Image (cartoon, coloured by chain):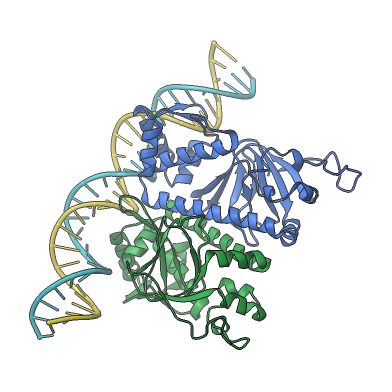
Chain colours: A blue, B green, C cyan, D yellow
Amino acid sequence: MTEIIEVAKPHGHACGRKPGENYCDTCKVRSLAVCAALGAEELPELDSIVHHTRADAKTTFIHQGETAESVFSVTEGVVRLYKLLSDGRRQIIGFAMPGDFLGLALHNRYGFSADAVDPVGLCRFDRRDFDNLITAKPHFLRRLHEFATHELVIAQEQMTLIGRRSAEERVAAFLIAMRERWARIKGPSVTIQLPMQRIDMADYLGLTIETVSRTLTKLARDGIILIVPEAVRVLDEKRLAAIARS
Amino acid sequence: MTEIIEVAKPHGHACGRKPGENYCDTCKVRSLAVCAALGAEELPELDSIVHHTRADAKTTFIHQGETAESVFSVTEGVVRLYKLLSDGRRQIIGFAMPGDFLGLALHNRYGFSADAVDPVGLCRFDRRDFDNLITAKPHFLRRLHEFATHELVIAQEQMTLIGRRSAEERVAAFLIAMRERWARIKGPSVTIQLPMQRIDMADYLGLTIETVSRTLTKLARDGIILIVPEAVRVLDEKRLAAIARS
DNA sequence: CACCCGATTTGATTTAGAGCAAGGACGGAT
DNA sequence: ATCCGTCCTTGCTCTAAATCAAATCGGGTG
């Protein structure tokens, strides 16, 4: 029942805030997020409808089937998005990271649930407000559309991964994808942060926790990676990529 | 090497065509397609950039990896969209039917191939022209974005289907999905047209041809469906839905 | 009509990964 | 330091679906 915590704003919108003084100005992930479509002069408009919130690790802040009243942009931390079947089987449809937008794939109700893997920072938008912004700013809609088509590309690649590739290929491809995503946010590194649990990787890759564990162990035994807490270190980039490419 | 055939237009755009006289006016699937976003007075603009084409059964008209110079709207027939791995494994990422749009999930190059399952009618647009139209008409972009988010919802459901459901559940869900799609186009029917081959269903569902065949045979033996050439007849809707729902 | 060829079905066997059951590692609470 | 709970790993067994191998069906063609 834990819900997300709405962070109080030091300056209300209607108060005497000086022009240019807003959160979005100093946002570290603005250039990655949908917000990058808006110029500096438009930021106050964005700032006036954004609600800065946080979600504690392990809390669910989007519930599959509920009326979709908000959309979110992730500023910090990692979110897992998943679908649940009636008998408890789960498919993780994606991990959202800083700069990612949540709320593309929805109609009136959320088609998935979302929870914080670690402590997460979010910009929440009322769907109505967000819709008005889209209508007023076609270039913003365009950016959103680019995000949607990019998500679609990722989803189709994931279908191929799950439908046609072996456990080892899936795990290797996952590691490389995570590495590239972190690189965009934090810059390149041989250490791939994996804040999610093994079961999350399994539910993302259409495998079981045991298979993921065994596969990582095998990659480590083969000298391709080194398993460390919350991460893996890449030892043999070439071979890892070769496995992922199939 | 067979390429799509560009159909000659009886009226060139620059010629003395009377206002209101264009293909889109009489298009049977306009209300289903992206084109529905444009009012009657805007149709000539659409008509001026559309190229009516056909693709014979079995011909490939989008090649994965090639520069994406066109986007398409399907007016007739069924198209299979797929990704190929270097060793020949194939994942069909979707079947496009009349009203569907091809060209959402692309950047500079096509990320998938497409070929005609049966004879297909297509509206082809030059990407540049299409882009100009989008820029000029925000409501058209909006419609396109709705198509993209809808595709994304479908893709995420497919991920769940492939990643977490049994062969029988996959086949049952596929049959029901096909039935609903035909219903939108042609109206409801107990006969589900299946113009694609077993191997296409298999590659769509992440299974093998033998498993698809056996599963259909089992559904038929259980009195849930009747297998007929190019289609199946639904005999027990309730049980079919129950299997698909999991 | 007989033949051919591709698609599909069916049967027999194998296997990748699932499922089950212990251990082990690690972090937080007492 | 010890206990406890969660997560992760490992070993063993089982099974759903893959793979291999024939039939069988059906539509076109000479």
Q: Position of residue A47 (x, y in %)?
A: 78, 47
Foreground residue among B119 and A202: B119
Q: Position of residue A6 (x, y in %)?
A: 76, 43
Q: Quadrant of residue B205?
A: bottom left
Residue at the (88%, 42%) spot, across then down: A18
Q: Is residue D2 above or below residue D29?
A: above
Residue at the (37%, 58%) spot, across then down: B167
Residue at the (51%, 36%) spot, across then down: A197
Quadrant (top left, top right, bottom left, bottom right) of the C terminus of chain A: top left
Foreground residue among A31 and A17: A31
Q: Position of residue B32 (x, y in %)?
A: 56, 75
Q: Residue furthest right?
A: A16
Foreground residue among C7 and A99: A99
Q: Quadrant of residue B201?
A: bottom left
Q: Position of residue A38 (x, y in %)?
A: 72, 50
Foreground residue among B46 and B170: B46
Q: Is residue D26 above or below residue B111?
A: below
Residue at the (50%, 63%) spot, across then down: B103
Quadrant (top left, top right, bottom left, bottom right) of the N terminus of chain A: top right
